[in-house]
Image (spheres, rainbow, N blue to C red):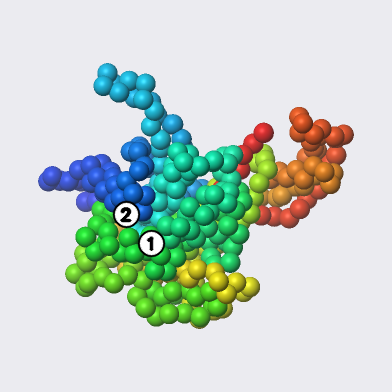
Amino acid sequence: MARRRIQGDHTRIGGDLKPTLDTYDELQRAFDFFNTELFGSRLPQCLITLSRQHDTLGYFSANQFVNLSEGGKGEYCHEITLNPTYFAIRSIPENLSVMVREMVSLAQVLEGKPPRRRYRNREWADMCEAIGLMPSDTGKPGGKRVGDSVQTYIIDCGLFDLASAKLIDSEFKLSWVDRFPPEQPAGASEEPAATILADGGNSQAPAHAQNAESRTANPLDQLDELDSDDEGGGVLLDVEGEGDLPADAKPVNAFKKVADPEPEVPDDAPRMKVFAHAQTAELAQLGIEPQKATKNPSKSKYSCTVKTCKGNVWGKPGMRVSCMGTDKKPHDPELMVFDGAVTLEEPVETF
């Protein structure tokens, strides 16, 4: 990546501005709001953190922190991590939907039967859909609801959609965003926000009913990104470049033209809310400088030839990998075969 030019005029923080307090107060406010609106205030407080990890929008970690103070010594706390890199190129509802998606994971730990790490099971999918976030391994209508690489999209007029609109109407904003997000694709659409229907049609209703003042005060509300995930599972041998949303994956912020039909989408698939995004010139006016991606997210997939094994690994092209099964189901060493190049969308679990 090219060296970033640092200009003195942009590095001075004056007055009473406190970026840390601003950021975490806003995220805490959003957590408390959705906890009340969508979860009946039954979720415990957790530690919200930010991580500029290039390969993920966010994740949940159970019992990640422990309290060492006298008042709460030994008490555990869960963690929800969000990636601020994408705050500038995603709308506020889309960014907050990642938090709420992981709040569902928290609820499942407390009330359900969470699966192994990174796997999304039917219980989790049902809990997400019940609050207006549709699980989909493609990030669009018609994708698989369960699996190793399942994200969510916002259901039009669902509970989350209505709740997030209510929050934004209360003048909620994300005051601080990363100045160097992934570069948006060339030729991105400038069409207004609309809704993707299950049948591939479209509705020109606005994504959110916002007044002109709030839209002017917070132009980042109009930013757009459609998440994209690929199926995955197994072992990742080379961890470089893996993740649930690589910086140069297609699309990172590709705007879906609602006039284009969605292939093989079930008639009963919930409608997806789509948000218009800002163009490069508009981002520049906000001091945001999108950067070209430098890492190739593609990995070669190798599969075991033993039918009863079904082992998969991902690694660099041209690797020679053999499989001996698992501890419970071992078999003679067999050379794994190349099974195509894939784009990893989430870190995969190793043995």
Res. 182 image quadrant:
bottom left
The residue that mark 1 highlights is: 159
SS of the residue at dot 1?
helix
For the residue pair 16 and 65, the one nearer the viewer reads as 65
Q: Give the residue at mark 2.
A: 37
Residue 214: horizontal and vertical position, in percent? 22, 66
Mark 1 belongs to which amino acid? Leu
Q: Is residue 64 left or right of residue 348?
A: left
Which residue is located at x 32 percent, y 54 percent? 37
Instruction: Using residue 273 as the reference point, say whether residue 55 is left or right of it.
Output: right
Q: Residue at x 61, y 51 (%)?
A: 147
Q: Are marks 2 and 1 in contact (CB under 8 Å)?
A: yes
The residue lying furthest to the left in this view is 15
* Residues packed near mark 2 inside 10 Å, few (<14), some (14 to 19) or many (20 plus): some
Give percent across and percent down for residue 48. Answer: 35, 41
Q: Residue furthest right?
A: 332
Q: Earlier in the sequence, mark 2 or mark 1?
A: 2
Above or below, 328 against 43 in this view is above
Look at the image and tell me whether residue 9 can be seen.
yes
